[in-house]
Image (cartoon, rainbow, N blue to C red):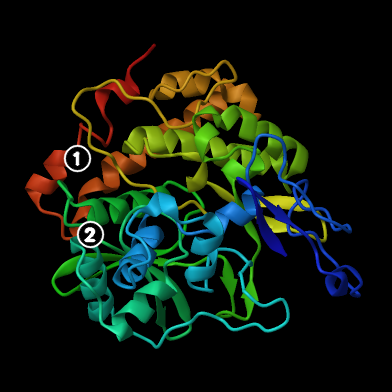
C-alpha cells in the first residue's frame, strides 16, 4: 500500500503478500519485506523505485491535458505523485503498477492506435489542443514512460516499442540524431537498446525496442534508475556521479568488472558523441529480488546535444573528486575507478573514435540525414575538438 503522509509517501506490504509462499522485496535497501509502514530512506520523500515508475515531464503533460479538460487543474505542481501514478497507464517501465483497490486489478490499457494516430495525438498535446476520447486513451497508455520528449507505446506484432517523436520546438533533427548515436554506439561495441527509424504523418519517429519486457508482456522485469541506486531524489540529482555508481557496481551488481568496463565505455562514448544529458535517470539496472543483485540494462537515450562553444560538461561527475568535463583524456585519467588500466581505457576510446569517423556517413545515410544536418552535428556535438583535447 502506498500512502501520502504530509510531504512524504510511505509504503506497506499487504499481509497476504508477506505471508505468501514467495515474498520478494520490490527493491533493497528501500523496501525490505516486513510488517508495518516503511518510510522513505533519509533525504527522500518517496522510495526511489516508486518514483521511477511515475510519469516524467511528457507523461505529466499528457495527464494534465486530460485533467485540465475536466477542469481539475492545468498546473503540474498542484498534482501529487500519487495522482500521477494512478492517472498514468499501467504498462509503465519496470514491473510495478498502481491501483486504487487493494484487491481488484484493473489495468489502464487502451485500444490499439496506429503510429499516425499517435503522432497526431502527441502533436495536439504539444499545442495544448484537446484529444478525442480514443486518442486520449491511446496516448495515456504510454504516459507512464519517463522522459521529457513526446512519446507513446506501440505494439508491432510480438514487439513492444517506445515510439519517440520529433517535437515542434526542435532546432535540429533530434530523432534522427538519436538513431545515429544509438547505431554508432552499437557498432562501437556498447550494449544498447535496439532502435529503428521510421515516419508517421511525415514526421520522424524513433522506435525503441523495450528491454523491460520478455515474451510480450508476459514477464515484466523489475528495474530501477541510477538515481534510485544512489539513493538520491530529483532535487539532489546534480550530486549523482559515475564514480559513486561505480562503487555500487562493485558492491551490488552481477559481473562487476565487466559492468565497470561497460560503464566506462558509455561515459566516453557520451563524451565523443556529444550527449551531455547523461543524467542519473538515463541509466538503469534490472533488479533481481531473488539474488538481490543488480544488472546494468542496455543503454538508452543517447543523443548528441548541440552547443554553442567547445567547453562542456557531463550531467554526472566522472571522477571521484567531482570532475565532469566532456573530455576523454580526463576520463582516461579515471580508468582505475572502472577497473581498467590506462592502456585498456585508451583502447576503448580509440575504437570508439575510429567507429564514429569510419561509419558516420553510412549511418547518417541510413537516417536519411542531409548534408546540412550532418554538418550541424559534426564537430559541434559529434567529435567536438574539446572532447579530444589533451588536458
Q: Quadrant of the C terminus?
A: top left
Give residue 8's position: percent from left, percent from top. Answer: 64, 47
- How many residues crowd mark 1 within 10 Å: few (<14), some (14–19), many (20+)? many
- How many residues crowd mark 2 within 10 Å: few (<14), some (14–19), many (20+)? many
Among the 4 quarters of the image, the one containing residue 164: bottom left
Q: Residue at x 38, y 47 (%)?
A: 302
Read off the residue under disc 1: 377
Q: Is residue 248 left or right of residue 214?
A: right
Q: Residue at x 42, y 70 (%)?
A: 142
Q: Nearer the viewer, residue 173 or 103?
A: 103
Q: Nearer the viewer, residue 67 or 338?
A: 67
Q: Residue most toward the top? A: 391
Q: Nearer the viewer, residue 98 or 184?
A: 98
Spatial distance from mark 1 to mark 2, Cα to Cα? Answer: 17 Å
Q: Residue at x 66, y 29 (%)?
A: 339
Q: Nearer the viewer, mark 1 or mark 2?
A: 2
Label 2 sits on a secondary structure element that is loop
Give residue 113's position: percent from left, percent from top. Answer: 33, 84
Residue 340 in view in this figure: no
Label 1 sits on a secondary structure element that is helix
Mark identifier at residue 340: none
Q: Is residue 387 left or right of residue 49?
A: left
Q: Residue most toward the left? A: 372
Reading the chain from its start, which is encountered first: label 1 or label 2? 2
Give residue 85's position: percent from left, percent from top. Answer: 54, 64
Check the image and report above or below for 107 versus 309.
Answer: below
Give residue 294's position: percent from left, percent from top. Answer: 70, 50
Check the image and report above or below for 365 versus 266.
Answer: below
Read off the residue under disc 2: 166
Residue 142 in view in this figure: yes
Amino acid at each position: 500500500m502506498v500512502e501520502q503522509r504530509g510531504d512524504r509517501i510511505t509504503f506497506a506490504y499487504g499481509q497476504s503478500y508477506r505471508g505468501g509462499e514467495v515474498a520478494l522485496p520490490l527493491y533493497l535497501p528501500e523496501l525490505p519485506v516486513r510488517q508495518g509502514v516503511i518510510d522513505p530512506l533519509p533525504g527522500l520523500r518517496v522510495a526511489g523505485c516508486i518514483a521511477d515508475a511515475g510519469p516524467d515531464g511528457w507523461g505529466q503533460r499528457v495527464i494534465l491535458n486530460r485533467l485540465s479538460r475536466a477542469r481539475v487543474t492545468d498546473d503540474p505542481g498542484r498534482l501529487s505523485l500519487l495522482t500521477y501514478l494512478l492517472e498514468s497507464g499501467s504498462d509503465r517501465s519496470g514491473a510495478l503498477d498502481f491501483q486504487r483497490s487493494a484487491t481488484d486489478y484493473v489495468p489502464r490499457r487502451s485500444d490499439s492506435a496506429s503510429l499516425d494516430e499517435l503522432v497526431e495525438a502527441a502533436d495536439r498535446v504539444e499545442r495544448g489542443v484537446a484529444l478525442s476520447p480514443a486518442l486520449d486513451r491511446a496516448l495515456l497508455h504510454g504516459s507512464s514512460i519517463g522522459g521529457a520528449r513526446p512519446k507513446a507505446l506501440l505494439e508491432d506484432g510480438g514487439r513492444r516499442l517506445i515510439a519517440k517523436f520529433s517535437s515542434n520546438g526542435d532546432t535540429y533533427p533530434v530523432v534522427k540524431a538519436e538513431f545515429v548515436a544509438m547505431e554508432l554506439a552499437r557498432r562501437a561495441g556498447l550494449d544498447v537498446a535496439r532502435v529503428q527509424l521510421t515516419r508517421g504523418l511525415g514526421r520522424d519517429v524513433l522506435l525503441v525496442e523495450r528491454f523491460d519486457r520478455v515474451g510480450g508482456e508476459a514477464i515484466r522485469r523489475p528495474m530501477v534508475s541510477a538515481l534510485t541506486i544512489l539513493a538520491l531524489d530529483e532535487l539532489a540529482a546534480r550530486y549523482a556521479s559515475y564514480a559513486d555508481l561505480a562503487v555500487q557496481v562493485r558492491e551490488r551488481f552481477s559481473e562487476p568488472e565487466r559492468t565497470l568496463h561497460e560503464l566506462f565505455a558509455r561515459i566516453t562514448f557520451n563524451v565523443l558523441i556529444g550527449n551531455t544529458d547523461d543524467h542519473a535517470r538515463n541509466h538503469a539496472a534490472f533488479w533481481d529480488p531473488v539474488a538481490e543483485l543488480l544488472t546494468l540494462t542496455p543503454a538508452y537515450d543517447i543523443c548528441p546535444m548541440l552547443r554553442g562553444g567547445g567547453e562542456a560538461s557531463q550531467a554526472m561527475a566522472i571522477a571521484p573528486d567531482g570532475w565532469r568535463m566532456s573530455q576523454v583524456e580526463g576520463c582516461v585519467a579515471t580508468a582505475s575507478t572502472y577497473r581498467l588500466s590506462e592502456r585498456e581505457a585508451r583502447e576503448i576510446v580509440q575504437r570508439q573514435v575510429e567507429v564514429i569517423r569510419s561509419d558516420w556517413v553510412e549511418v547518417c545515410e541510413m537516417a536519411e540525414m542531409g548534408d546540412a544536418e550532418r554538418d550541424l552535428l559534426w564537430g559541434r556535438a559529434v567529435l567536438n575538438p574539446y572532447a579530444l583535447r589533451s588536458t
